[in-house]
Amino acid sequence: MTVSPRTCLNYINGTWTASSSYRVAESRNPADDREIVATFPLSDRSDVERAIGAAREAYKAWRLVPAPERAEYLYRTGEIMAKRKEELAVLMTREMGKTLTETGGDVQEGIDCAFYYAGEGRRLFGQTTPSELRNKFAMTVRQSIGVCALITPWNFPVAIPCWKAFPALVCGNTIILKPARDTPACATVLVEILEEAGFPPGVVNLLHGSGQSVGQALCESPGVNLVSFTGSSATGATVGEICGRTHKRVCLEMGGKNAQIVMDDADLDLALEGALWGAFGTTGQRCTATSRLLLHEKIKAEFVERLLDKTRQLCIGSGLDPNTDIGPLVNRQQLDNVRQYMEIARGEGAKVLIGGEVPQDSGLEYGYFFQPTILDGVTPSMRVAREEIFGPVVSAIEVKSFEEAIEILNNTPYGLSSSIYTRDVNRAFQAIRDIEAGITYINGPTIGAEVHLPFGGVKQTGNGHREAGSAVLDVFSEWKTVYVDFSGRLQRAQIDNRE
Ligand code: UN1
């Protein structure tokens, strides 16, 4: 069945509009690149300026809407998203390739996020604390920040925009969403849902286009107060640099090189299921994906053997087919990256135990498929052991002890997710203490974070902020400290109370 391409437009000040450049580009189905999924505008600086103008104007009234009332819009958003869940999941599979089970999960994460941050509208707690002076009251309140630019990736084309948009909105900010070029249709449907939920014109804006023109202009403009970015480390460094120069608040979520440790006392069946899902789920295109297995020497041979068996049974194909376990990579560039890493791995002396190639099966020739791949003989200094691959490739690394496993796990520039399978409770708690990562799973895979807990990483994964949970409220709001002196006289802190 062919579906005609969707025409995506920008959304500025409550109106769907073409770019003033009139230039367009298209997104294609990565399982069959003959299919155009959508066309979208390549916005230019004048579109960016119009969106910023609309968002600034709308901010004046939106910041004054009481937070519980702002939350009502999010409840409606969650309800509409739930109604459109299946439609959105199918569209997402067509646009970026992951399986229907996974795209349904992506939309569900967005729905959960809507209800969670709607609830925050009735909390947004500040603190009260005693003043050091008599007849004086001290408290903190959260204040909105202004116009937030949200620059989002293609791998979670609904969930990640929701992680950013919903807390931003409930905190009283207005937003400009700049989605990835690979997933314009998913972003368009999300904004249609926000429109239907009734957000006033200018509160939510959408700009399609390239990072070089739209993303950069948003980062540079003095009209934007905050940039929240999820994507590659290289782009994140540029975003951070421009925002530093222009004194903007910036939240960066970047790469990962996540490891799963399997100790000799682990439940191997459980650890195998975890490794399979963590490494090959979403075709390895998650920043939380498992890309290193740190296997205790006593179980390594058996574990690898059994993992190979399970990997052989995985079915590669279109994500729309219910039998598919592994969909395609998102685009040709991503496929070329993974192939290049295979050459690097072979050149460095790693051994390909399974996979490592583009599948030759008929029916897959028009897609960006890659076989699930397990590498052996990988040493911690090799590039494949240190750099993010973002594909279905996992390295099996032997470790002699728990201490060695932790040392290797920490030996990367990143620190997002991590996991350990062990039945030893002491080991588990030592791992929680010693692993350098924002997230640690005990007896679970490295993927599968939930929206009401903080999400983010240490070292080069981020810049110290957390998304999701109540932690992200510290990104999207400013603390104001308020002192109320009801003594009717001048009271001097640090002086009068010491006399
Ligand atoms: C990402 O890959 O950028 O924890 C986000 C997970 C998902 C989110 C991944 N809930 O795997």
Image (cartoon, rainbow, N blue to C red):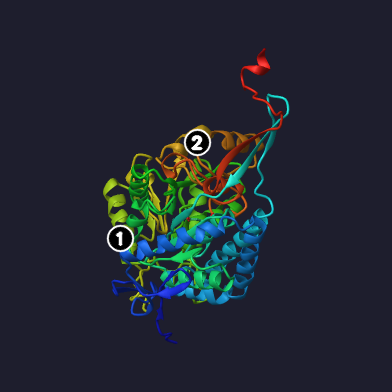
Q: Position of residue 430 (x, y in %)?
A: 59, 33
- In the figure, is residue 423 to the left or right of 175? right
Amino acid type assigned to the residue bearing label 1 in the image: Ser
Amino acid type assigned to the residue bearing label 2 in the image: Ile
- Neighbour class for label 1 at 10 Å: few (<14), some, many (≥20)? some
Of 375 and 24, which appears nearest the observer?
Answer: 24
Q: Residue furthest bottom?
A: 1
> Label 2 belongs to which residue?
406
- In the figure, is residue 314 to the left or right of 450? left
Count of all numbered marks drawn on residues in the image:
2
Q: Considering the numbered disc 2 on the image, is that residue within a helix, a strand or a loop?
A: helix
The residue under the point 36% across, 75% down is 18
Of 334 and 18, which appears nearest the observer?
Answer: 18
Q: Considering the numbered disc 1 on the image, is that residue within a helix, a strand or a loop?
A: helix
Q: Is residue 309 visible?
A: no
Q: Position of residue 238 (x, y in %)?
A: 33, 48
Q: Is residue 244 above or below residue 66?
A: above
> Residue 213 shows which numbered tag?
1
- Quadrant position of the C terminus in the picture: top right
Mark 2 vs mark 1: which is more N-terminal?
1
> Residue 188 shows which numbered tag?
none
Q: Is residue 67 above or below residue 381?
A: below
- Neighbour class for label 2 at 10 Å: few (<14), some, many (≥20)? many
